[in-house]
Amino acid sequence: MYTVKTDKLRPGQILAEQVRDVNGRLLLASGNEIQPNHIRIFKIWGISEVNVAGADRQKENDKSELDPDLVEQVRGSLMILCRHLDLEHPALKELFEQAVKFRCRNEPVEAERNLHAAEPEPQEPPPKQNFLDQLHKKKIILPEIPSIVSELNEVIANPLSSAEHIAEVVNRSPSLTALLLKIVNSSFYSFPSKIGKVSHAVSLIGTREFTGLAQGISIISIFNNIPKEIIDMFSFLKHSFACGIFSRILAAHLNSSQTEQLFVSGLLHDLGRLILYIHFPKESCIILTRSRNRSKLLYREEQDYLGCSHAEVGQQLMKQWKLPVILENNVCYHHKPSAAQQVVPASIVHLADLIVNMLGIGSSGEKLIPPLEHTAWEALKLPPSSFEKLIGQATHQFKALETILRV
Ligand SMILES: [Fe+2]
Ligand SMILES: [Fe+2]
């Protein structure tokens, strides 16, 4: 089985995996011979690629083109980053191999540099008070909810609201409108014709889904003044969007109806880190330095130093902003999905975060690869062989990322 772009499909090829539209409706079942009208339908529904039966000769050629020295070098450095992972686990074994190929085919990954460069460690004692309690106190002001987020909450709560009402709210912010239109016209959705109006985008993507997307984008956009010495925001956004993309792909693959909500969960999963970077820069620098010097996972260092991790800080913010409970669930438990009320969606974000870290797409400050919770893996019931296809699908969308993030 291999993936073919819809433009390159030929009648007579056999569909190896079912094709669904953006709303999850079945367009063609697996095993069918592809006819010219199927290709036309795929294009109308914005299906950019499908999986067909057989061996991909082009890919076989690509494999043999990988430089063996580079493969060994990448394998060695990735192994160091995977020190907290059980690479004997069948899923991680397969993911590791796919990540080596991905890294070899893409630019060298930033996260591998400076891993061993020990930095002077400030000898500051950890905060005495319970950190989450401190967040409630007046002196620590959490960012104000962007007005668009609360207005969209009101619109979506009204059963009489239409696509026009949502568009009216979004159109008040020209920058948000421009970014959203850029996203819906990119290969994230691959709609066959250009979408010029927000109301059109809402009717195509769905009211709830589009609202979630608009809220997620406006939330992440308010964090734009973090000093570069603490975190490279471009890299942070790349990691966040990539996790959103992968969560959405996993959700669609598992036939979940919450694809856009999972995209937003992935996009906002490390939001708590931004709060720490902005409001606690001194503590953040200590945590970042200690985790690098000791090769310890960043979220564990946060837990040890602050008594809570960025996942709980993110949850506080979502509570304060009255965002859907499912977002709180997915953000709070993305490092420990088995403890979540809804294990499957939290496990999707958990796995997406692991994959994106393994592939080395951006970073939220973490240099090492976070471990896989075995319960989460079992909850998803994914065969390890699906990684190749899923990473292939995501690669197509990652390419649109750079362009979108530079808006
Ligand atoms: Fe995280
Ligand atoms: Fe992350």
Image (spheres, rainbow, N blue to C red):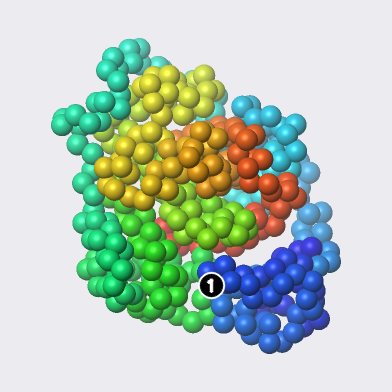
Q: Position of residue 391 (x, y in %)?
A: 64, 54
Where 198 sits versus 380, above or below?
below
Specify whether 393 is left or right of 240. right
Give the residue number, with chain letter if any, for mark 1. Answer: 190
Specify whether 198 is left or right of 391. left
Q: Nearer the viewer, residue 346 or 181?
A: 346
Dot 1 crowding, Cα within 10 Å, few <14, some 14–19, many 20+: many
What amino acid is at disc 1? Ser
Q: Position of residue 205 (x, y in %)?
A: 45, 70
Residue at image x 45%, y 56%? 261
Q: Quadrant of the N terminus?
A: bottom right
Q: Quadrant of residue 74?
A: top right
Any part of residue 282 in sight: no
Residue at image x 39%, y 64%? 208
Q: Nearer the viewer, residue 103 or 344?
A: 344
Q: Position of residue 127 (x, y in %)?
A: 30, 17
Q: Quadrant of the C terminus?
A: bottom left
